[in-house]
Amino acid sequence: MSLENRIAEIIVSRLNVKPEEVTDIANLKDDLGADSLDMVDLMMDLEDTFNLKISDEEGNTLQTVGSVVAFLKTKGIEA
Amino acid sequence: MSLNATAVVTGAARGIGLEIARKLIEAGWTVAALDMLEDDLKASAAELGENYKPYTVNITDSIMLAEVAAAVGRDLPTVKGIVNNAGITRDALMMRMSEDQWNMVLDVNLTGSWKVTQAFMRSLIRAREGSIVSVSSVVGLLGAAGQVNYAASKAGLIGMSKSLNRELAGRGITVNVVAPGFIESEMTENLPEAVRSDYLSRIPAGRLGLPVEIAEAVTFLMSPSAKYITGIVLPIDGGLTT
């Protein structure tokens, strides 16, 4: 499964949204309805899934689905 | 009747914690019973049956606690309840209280509750429902000579719970505190007769409380009937604090 698809799957299950809503430019808070608790939960999920640490500062920069994908790629995660 | 949900109860091997476990099991919960007292846990498991799942753990040990949280997550129904009941006393007048006495009580009663809550709360958040109840004490409200450490820890649970309530209430999770008064338990049975009769004279109900009377209130706060009750401190004290 591609990195994009794995991330989309996590977002769909955590935020309880439809797969077609999870586009590259979708904003996690504004478009997908994540509140601050959802964001923390999502970051912890990404940490567990991809075995990395996301600092609060890094987490705050992750606004859109695309930015999450790009961020994980900078951490050397491809799939 | 099974709720297919797990309640984590600390200090569940005996005393008030054991009664809480018993009442929760009667209400359909599976109970993850956390305690340091392995023999008492075994005896209680033999008494309460298969829905009482014993875990020997020191709640001040984060690593051990993480292992227990993983095991509970793997083996038991979804955790939807947390009862922070474990507590100790190390009484001394302030002038004579050692730093160890202060630290031990704060470590178990307050920091331990924080650790347990953090270890298990994600499950409630994901489920978007659940209840957290912390067992404080009237001593946290009134203070008691010789119990600066204990009173501080029990008052700390109130601040912790009220703040956590503000984080979690929007998720359908209730966070409450019960504040038992003087209850028939090991903590009170060794009191000198003069102290005991002094206590009795201050309790409008004219008697000490029973562990089961705490357990009934905790079970109610964790039931669907109490869904809209959150952020409260409920004294269960025969009128002592009124």
Image (tube, coloured by chain):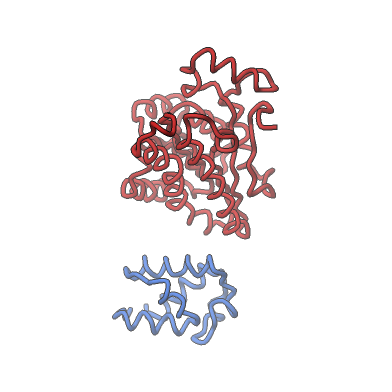
Question: What color is chain A drawn in?
Answer: blue
Question: What color is chain B drawn in?
Answer: red
Image coordinates for residue B156, horizontal then vertical, percent: 51, 45
Image coordinates for residue B164, horizontal then vertical, percent: 55, 54
* A23 versus B29 height, above or below: below
* A32 versus B227 height, above or below: below
Tell me which residue sits at (42%, 50%) in the image: B73
Which residue is farthest left? A76
Image coordinates for residue B90, horizontal then vertical, percent: 40, 31
Which residue is farthest bottom? A25
Which residue is farthest front? B95
Left or right: B116 in relation to B198: left
Which of B27 and B174 lies nearest the eye of the viewer? B174
In which quarter of the view is residue B1 placed? top right
Tell me which residue sits at (33%, 78%) in the image: A79
Q: Quadrant of the C terminus of chain B?
A: top right
In which quarter of the view is residue B167 placed? bottom right
In which quarter of the view is residue B222 placed? top right
